[in-house]
Amino acid sequence: MINHNSYFMDYEECHMYNQSSKNICLLDDIRLKNGKDKLKAAYYEIVDTDVYRAIDLINDEKLQFPSLFILQGEISKFDLYPSLSLRNKLAIDISNDILARRDSEARFITSSNREDMYSILKWILNTGYLDDGLNDRYDEVIETAAILLVKEYGDKDCFNQIESLIFDRHRKGFFIYDLVWAYFETCASDNLSGLIERLRSPIWKDVELSRKLLNFIPCIGSNASSEPATQYESAVKWFNQNKDFLNYTGESFLQTSTPCRYTVSLESKYLHETIPVSIKETSRSISQDKHALLKNFRELDDESKSLLSNYSAILFQKNKHKWNKWIKSPMSNQIEIAKRFSGGNF
Amino acid sequence: MIKISGNTLEPNSIAGQYKSNSIEIKIIDILSSSSTIYKYDSEDQLKFELSLRKSLIAASRALYRSKFSFKVFRKSKCNTDFWHRTNEGGFLLERGVMASDAINDIYINGSKYATECSTAIVIVYYKAIADVYPKELFNKMFPEIYLMNWQHLDSDLGITNKSKLPDYFPGDCRYFKNPDVDPLTPEWQGENTFDLGNDTYYGHGLGIADSERIIRALNRRRIEDSTTSAYLMDSAVRPNFKYLADRLNS
């Protein structure tokens, strides 16, 4: 038996509630204070008593996605879908697409307006990610919304949410691999600083996972047992020296047990310039002088390439004038100078 | 070229032990005709690799014939008499259950199991080893198995992923990458397969097919209007054959 008074307010109370609570709507408030079962029970009663009010409440602009998702059964039972706002209709359609795993031709997502779709996916993720773990179906919708934002819309503002989902799930032992894949598929090395921060997390499981994800950083891959604080400092130093020269490899946990997601492009580091992976593109996108330098550089052995690229990066940071002079000198001179100063004595 | 304890092995000296056109003969042909020198400490070590590669192919074909089905990790299932399904969708060996019995059950009661291709590959590795090792040794070496994609692999398998290899062999695990996968089906971002020989591969979910058909199947699971095809990567995953041979022969 539902206690009518515990979560069902009359119009006046509701009006007062709306006045006092600018950031949270009634249905979310019930959910957050009493849980999903009581939200369902309360909404059932509201519909039963005053269907128009029930529609107003569910269409509240401040409503968060978890409440809508939880109330899908009630919406269907009372045939409220036609009365839903566009946002709510789209969110339900997207959820159904995801859960039914429809083929692309039969999907609602692909046939709808891209801008609408983007804003609904953002709403789902932004208001819904903190409730990840609600149930398996919900988690799948949240995860797929995140993947779509990254892969379909190239959204780079959702990294924090995705990162939070990954680490939160990992602590609970839940499925993380598709989210990890999407996170790296953005190919945006900028967001690695968030992962590096987690190397010194007070939660050991976070440290373990961030080490696993950042295994391409030499001080982590080769020395997984070192102190988190020491490792963090070394990783920050390495990242600052190499962040502009990282190439995404596309390796994932589906492919191998220890995917190495980034490699340092020695060519980029040497020229201090982004070099596209394709050789054809290279010749179009860099100057003739640099193309000639690159040609000579590519003929060197691995050890010389590493020596020159490291020296180049450090010299560029210290003294651009000297770097300009050095890079224009013959290759044999460049190697001689780099060798003379290897060890950091410049 | 094959070298055993520093001495070149003439392929004919060992080929007589196998049927013509067998997998072993094909592998010996690739090894001996390669410009790369393949070194073994003993003939037994080489024979073990041939035997395990053959077993990997047999275990792949047997898994394909079983009623073991494809499901994403979120919806994976297993026989709970032998395995505990974890929150992330992996299968953890139940306490008190022998690893060999649990691995064999996947092949006997395939309809009770479903998962993605990467876990299927790991199952094939364990099954192939279980079929060439005595039961006691297998259970001693792998008392705690957790099947969850490529994670939690037993270090005794010595699994490594190597790129740009000079030769590829039947029994290698090869990866078909699908860079433009439909984001709603990330499970098709690539397909882990076993090379069965003669450009034939087994990939869980796609079945047994040649490379062209696997690529076509993955291409059907791309984003709309993609022009970037799936492709077979220039890499292979292999167990540490020599270590596994030495454990058997020690």
Image (cartoon, coloured by chain):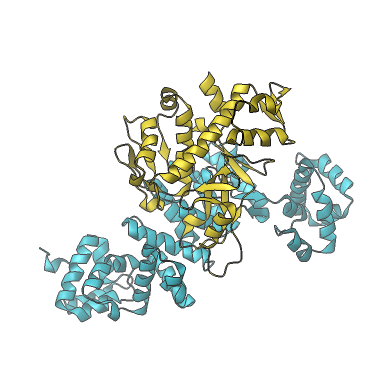
Chain colours: A cyan, B yellow
Looking at the image, the residue that sits furthest to the left is A1
> x%, y% of residue B163?
64, 44
Q: Is residue A253 visible?
A: no
Q: Count how many numbered circles sit on residues in the image.
A: 0
Give the quarter of the image for residue B144: top left
Camera sees residue B248: yes
Image vertical order of residue B223 relative to residue A244, above or below: below
Q: Nearer the viewer, residue A210 or A316?
A: A210
**In this rendering, is residue A241 above or below B105?**
below
Q: Please provide percent x and percent y for residue B121.
A: 48, 43
Place of residue B80 in the rendered image (x, y in percent of width and height, measured from the top left): 30, 40
Residue lying at the far front in this picture: please name it. B20
What residue sits 70% from the left and 60% below the top?
A276
Quadrant where the N terminus of chain B sits is top right
Q: Residue A98 is drawn in which quadrant?
A: bottom left
Q: Position of residue B62 (x, y in %)?
A: 44, 41
- Give the answer, above or below, for where A220 lies relative to A33: above
Describe residue B79's horizontal placement relative to residue A316 as left or right: left
Residue at position x 48%, y 57% from top? B186
Task: Pick the residue in front: B61 or A146.
Answer: B61
Taking A58 as reference, is A112 left or right? right
Q: Nearer the viewer, residue A133 or A224?
A: A133
